[in-house]
Amino acid sequence: MVRRRDVGLILVLAVATALTVPIPSASAARDPLAEAQAKITAAQVAADKAAAEYGDAETRYYRLQDDALRTDRRITSLRAERSRLAAIVRQRLTISMLGNATCGTRSRIKRRH
């Protein structure tokens, strides 16, 4: 048979134990160290993501810069080619015009001989 005094003592010990043992979810939410570590981890993840995005953007920038340099060189080359071809066209036009102008003269010179 359980005595009344023993039951009272057991109840007092149970309440004292319940008050001194922290509840895991409540203590984890209020643990400043855990909160700070979680914030640091989140900041590190965000910093890593930002660094990766910056690296990708920098790579794209340098590719575009190289493309622009190649394009500028190509434009310079094409302008030089255009000038060369324009000179050939002018030369051929001049020869053609001179040829047409002297055609009549050549045929007259041949007839005289």
Image: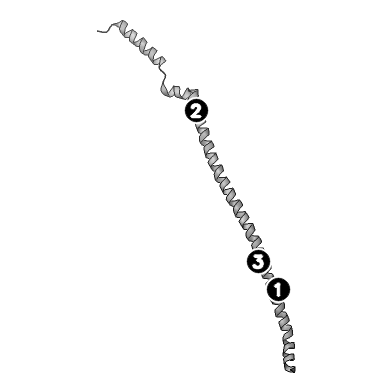
For residue 37, the mark is 2
Q: Using a 10 Å C-alpha cutoff, classify the residue at mark 2 as few (fewer than 14 neighbours), some (14 to 19) or many (20 or more).
A: few
Q: Quadrant of the C terminus?
A: bottom right
In the foreground, 9 or 111: 111
Q: Is residue 55 left or right of residue 73?
A: left
Q: Amino acid at mark 2?
A: Gln
State the SS at label 1: helix
For residue 81, the mark is 3
User: Vertically, is 106 above or below 85?
Assistant: below
Q: Amino acid at mark 1?
A: Arg
For residue 90, the mark is 1
Give x and y (percent) for residue 84.
67, 68
Q: Is residue 54 left or right of residue 2?
A: right
**Quadrant in the rendering for residue 27:** top left
In the foreground, 6 or 4: 6
Residue at the spot 53% in from the left edge and 36% down from the top edge: 46
Label located before the other in sequence (3 or 1): 3
Label located before the other in sequence (2 or 3): 2
Residue at the spot 70% in from the left edge and 71% down from the top edge: 87
State the SS at label 2: helix
For residue 26, the mark is none
User: Vertically, is 98 above or below 77?
Assistant: below
User: Vertically, is 65 above or below 97?
Assistant: above
Residue at the spot 59% in from the left edge and 54% down from the top edge: 67
State the SS at label 3: helix
Could you tell me how far apart the alpha carbons at marks 2 and 1 are, in whole angstroms?
78 Å
